[in-house]
Amino acid sequence: MDVLTDDHEREEAVRHWWHENWKPIALGIAIALAGLIGFRQYQSYTLHKAQDQAYEMYTLQYRLSKEDAKAREDSEAFLKAHDDIYGSLLALDLVTLDIAKKDYEAAATHARFAVKNGGDLVSPSASLTLARVLTEQKQYDEALGILKGITQDAYAAQREELRGDVLLQKGDRDGARTAYLESVKLLNAAKQQVSGVLQMKLDSVAAAGDKPAFELVKATDKEQALKEAKAD
């Protein structure tokens, strides 16, 4: 690149450069502005579309709860058009209705839809639901496989309790006991209440020499309290 030796040469060079390049620069600025405006319009469009989809989903949920004669048909049509979180949430409502009718095949179909399309927000819960449905169908190994795929910490205690249910249905009492104990351990570690139902499940598969579940929970609570006291 040549070195410019005085201000006049620099000024002339700038004028020449601007004369040669002002059109593409102006065009680039215009495109950028149009893109910004377009992006904002797209955001607005996306927001309104999401609101419309949510409203349609809530309307169908309400109609299902009121046993609207045509709600089921309209809900199935909604699922075909919405392989997304909205469809997944509605699919879980259909699962509840399917289970009430003991139509486990339909329930499994809707639960699979929710798992596939629910994303991180819905899929873990939908997977638990699917595992329960598969257990009712005595498809224990598939149910256990579904549970194994739930890796989110927030669902770990529920996963282990349900794993215990599946194993118990399968006839594996020792495996069920291990899973229930793990669920209790996870709940205590997270400082969450251990339900009476889980305690009864654990007691039902207790091995010789095991403490009653309520004593195990109390002992764990005391240990936690002692740790917290020492920390203070």
Image (tube, grey):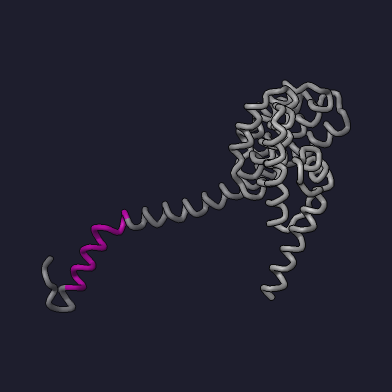
Whether residue 210 is situated above or below residue 32 in the rendered picture? above
Whether residue 6 is situated above or below residue 99 in the rendered picture? below
Whether residue 140 is situated above or below residue 186 in the rendered picture? above
Residue 52 in view in this figure? no
Q: Quadrant of the N terminus?
A: bottom left
Q: Residue furthest bottom?
A: 6
> Is 16 inside the magenta-drawn segment?
yes
Q: Give how far across and how far down residue 159 sits, in percent.
A: 68, 41
Total numbered labels: 0
Q: Give how far across and how far down residue 38 sits, in percent.
A: 52, 49
Q: Which residues are magenta?
A: 10-24
Q: Quadrant of the C terminus?
A: bottom right
Is 43 left or right of 226, judged from the image as shown? left
Whether residue 14 is situated above or below residue 57 in the rendered picture? below
Q: Give how far across and how far down residue 110 sits, in percent.
A: 70, 28
Q: Residue furthest front?
A: 209
> Foreground residue, 26 or 221?
221
Task: State which quadrant residue 197 falls in.
Answer: top right
Is 30 left or right of 135, judged from the image as shown? left
> Foreground residue, 147 or 9?
147
Identify the residue shown where x is 36% and y is 57%: 26
Task: State which quadrant residue 125 falls in.
Answer: top right
Residue 207 in view in this figure? yes
